[in-house]
Image: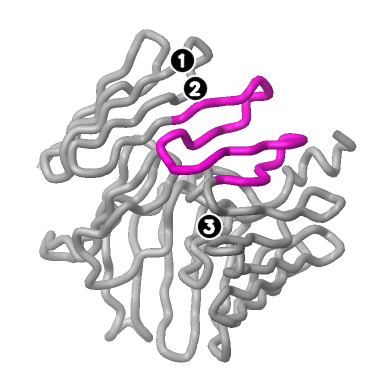
Amino acid sequence: YQRQYDYDKSGNLTRLLDTRKGQHDYHYDPLARLTRANHSQDVQERFGHDPAGNLLMQNRPGPDIVAGNRLMIQGDHHYDYDAFGNLIRERRGKGQQLVTEYRYDCQHRLIGLTTPNGQTAHYRYDPFGRRISKTVDDTTTEFFWQGDKLIAEHHAERHRSYLYEPDSFRPLVLLEGFGPKETKPYHYQLDHLGTPQELTDNEGEIVWSAHYRAYGEIARLDACKIDNPLRFQGQYCDAESGLHYNRHRYYNPDIGRYLTPDPVKLAGGI
């Protein structure tokens, strides 16, 4: 099993050849922005950018409408924002009747959402802004941190710990189980970005394997004997929403955008 990477003179990845997952070719505009991603085992992706540099998904049906650097419409998805630029509502489907609503606290942190099927999720944070729990319907998961790194999660039926490479967010091992006698280690196999591609057990068997699209959305899973929530470095995928929690805000890999403006810019008055 092998992965080979080719780059252009500017350092942009132009080809990734994976002996299991096929070939991926990447093309860029003169500003080094990704314009095409061709996948031998998946759909082809096309991207554009408006004059302000906003990403436009060109391989999808329907329009991409951006106003004030906010995505307003993409295909049949319509997006509503509050006065601070936080996404508060996503409407889709016939007559935009499928509605997902998002709620925030006074620090613009996502504290709850409701999906079109009525499922609810609630999120809590510590004084440092780190998410310490989420409750989906009646199930609560607690999160434990070391600095800005998520090192463990726990709910009534599962305990997990995460180990990383020194001084980085590149995961090495997932430890699952209660106590030393029950805990099983699973080893992360990463790509050049530090994104998990596979999880393997102690015998080298692949227990989790994913195909990604260019902006982090999983196209499909080849193996899923256990679930793996880690995505791009520092991101944790919430199964209830498909969003990636990214420490200070949430990322939507389907559209390649965050739900809220950059908090550093807000703090700096930009």
Which of the two discs, 3 and 1, sits closer to the camera? 1
Quadrant of the rendered structure where residue 131 is?
bottom right
Could you tell whether 60 is left or right of 140 in the image? left
Residue name at image x 28 percent, y 54 percent: 210
Please name the amino acid that badge 2 sits on.
Arg
* Residue beneath disc 2: 33
The residue at 28%/49% (across/down) is: 211
Cα–Cα gap, marks 3 and 1: 27 Å
Helix, strand or loop status at disc 1: loop
Q: Which residue is mark 3?
A: 244
The disc label shown at residue 233, or none: none
Of label 3 and label 1, which has the lower sequence position? 1
- Label 2 close to label 1 by CB (< 8 Å): yes
Q: How is the image coloured?
A: one colour
Tell me which label, 3 or 2, sits earlier in the chain. 2
Give the label on residue 29, or none.
Answer: 1
